[in-house]
Image: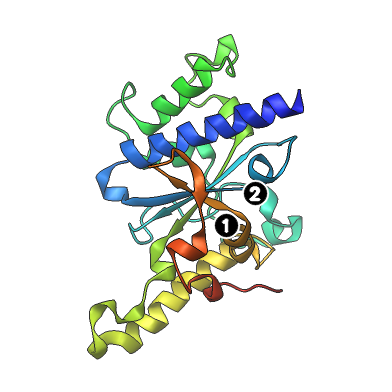
Amino acid sequence: MSNEKSSEFRDLARDIARVILVHSWEETQVKDVLLYGSTLLSSAPRDIDLLILHSQGTGLANYTTTLSKFTDGEIASGATIHYYSPNGILHQLGYNGEEDSVHSRVLDLFRERGMLRKEDHHTFIPPTIDKVLDLHVLTTLTITDPGFMGERHIDFYRQYIERVRQKAIRESGSDRTFFHRIFTQGKLYDPKSGDFTASFEDSYPGKLDLFPSSQ
């Protein structure tokens, strides 16, 4: 049964990545979708972990999609935690009416597989989505060469990009190695093969070193 679930989750992850890349709003400028975690690494996956790389700056919901990445102390201290449910992230990726949006298309994928309860079929934010998907969002500004605006402004953008990157690392949870780990272990979706086969290091050479590999 676990192998069946692994195959089902992998197949669903592929379809979700395709929907995100093809149907997201142009303004969100989604560049890549990376699969990591148990669906990629385990024969008994718990959920589907996807990281969405976009170049919309900090406008799209950044960066945390599950409060479980934080300790109770961090939450109780009132730290700035930008929490967005997977349903919320899907809505922000593209909403051109309830019948034609990234969220509605992902719901269709769940329905086709019989993964939604009957009472969820007409629910705007079905809890099954939040239970199965763990979505994380990261702006590609965190891996951008600060010289993109020219030498005259390179010092300013070097500092600015570093602040954005450190904010993303801080808001990813208690584990500061989160991004380094998932970029090392994960695979990017390749539209040509229709599967998660591309290496982050091959696609973004030298960018892995921008994220801490140890606490």
Q: Secondary structure at mark 1?
A: loop
Q: CA distance from mark 1 to mark 2?
A: 8 Å
User: Quick one: SS at disc 2?
Assistant: helix
Residue type for callout 2: Leu
C-beta proximity under 8 Å, tags 1 and 2: yes
- Rendered view: 66 above or below 139: above
Vertical side of 140 occupied by 198: above or below: above
Q: Quadrant of the N terminus?
A: top right
Q: Is residue 28 above or below residue 157?
A: above
Viewer-nearest residue: 197 or 160? 197
The residue identified by callout 1 is 81
Q: Nearer the viewer, residue 146 or 172?
A: 146
**Residue projecting furthest to the front:** 193
Residue designated by label 2: 67
Residue pictured at 34% horizontal, 89% vertical: 155
On the rendered structure, is 26 left or right of 37?
left
- Looking at the image, can residue 124 be seen? no
Q: Amino acid at mark 1?
A: Ile
For the point 27% across and 31% down, which residue is it? 96
Q: Picture coordinates of residue 13 (x, y %)?
A: 53, 35
List the single residue furthest toward the top: 118
